[in-house]
Amino acid sequence: MENNQEIEILCRLDLYMPRDNSKSSPVVAFVTGGAWIIGYKAWGALLGRRLAERGIIVACIDYRNFPQGTISDMVTDASEAISFICKNVVSFGGDPDKIYLMGQSAGAHIAACALLEQAVKESKGESTYWNLAQIKAYFGLSGGYNIQNLVDHFHERGLYRSIFLSIMEGEESLPRFSPEIVAKKLSAETISLLPQIVLLHGTADYSIPSSASATFADVLKQAGGKVELQLYEGKTHTDVFLQDPLRGGRDKMLEDVLSVIHVDDASAREKAASAPTPERLVYEWQIKLARQISPF
């Protein structure tokens, strides 16, 4: 990438840094959600804050929303940002051997598309800006991975068919941008290039049903992928991402993410376990009121 491109990408990143910068830190590249229309890097502020408190750098990625861009633009933006992070991770205190990719909702879908697109390119020997070997694991939070099967569901939820198909570049493009469908067609060799995949979903999610993650996990397992599914009983689409961090106290999703990132680092696990318990940021009645208003 040319220097002006790199500057532009840097302006589309929010970085959340640990206070202790005495040694290089794991890095999470985070792609936020927002129904492909209202995604914004600041939506990752709570996640960034919580992970930074536990010694992890978080880079929240921005991408073009519809109608400024369609799905292929979003995947390109995410992929270029991942490339920038992989290339520059050392300059902001990150460990180049501990880079993780994470997406939430639409961001989980976009990140998964970028991941599989990268696997296909590498299997064909095509030149790329980054490579999958640099990514230790992918975390998909509350994502939808077979969008061909979700068109009617989104229409009923208010993301109308005509708009959604415009975002996805037409009905004929739905299989191409459905990671679950793409994964079924990949060779075992291509699947083997993928990092560990961890799918996280609340069972009370009415924006994207948890079955979307469960089915994708099954497809990946059958294809020979390294995949783990973690379902959170009674949690909604945004509970594990917004409401639970606002509530303070123990955060099961955060613990599950940290267990993967720190799997080979006993010292980091011990330090994370002894970190102060986050305080409640808002009253419960405010969270309940917001749930009545939020379309998610």
Image (spheres, rainbow, N blue to C red):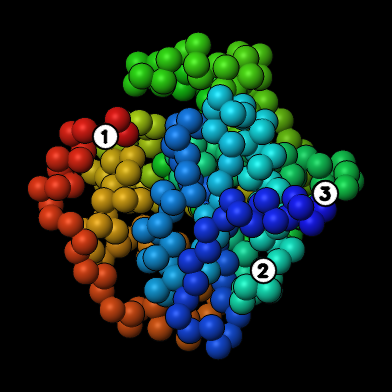
Label ID, residue 128: 3
**In front of the other: 260 or 294:** 294
Instruction: Tell me the kind of residue under disc 1.
Output: Ser
Residue at the spot 62% in from the left edge and 73% down from the top edge: 92
Q: Position of residue 58 (x, y in %)?
A: 51, 63
Q: Secondary structure at mark 3?
A: loop
User: Which image quadrant is residue 99 in?
Assistant: bottom right
- Viewer-side label of 2, 3: 2
Report the number of numbered marks. 3
- The local crowd at label 3, few if under 14, some if 14 to 19, many if 20 or more residues have their Cα within 10 Å, is few
* Residue 89 - label: 2
Residue bearing mark 1:
294
Gap between marks 2 and 1 measured at Cα: 35 Å
Horizontal and vertical percent position of residue 239: 29, 47
Q: Which residue occupies the extreme left position in the image?
A: 285
Up-down relation of residue 79 to residue 74 (above or below): below
Q: Is residue 213 visible?
A: no
Residue located 52% across and 69% down the image: 57
> Mark 1 or mark 2, which is nearer the start of the sequence?
2
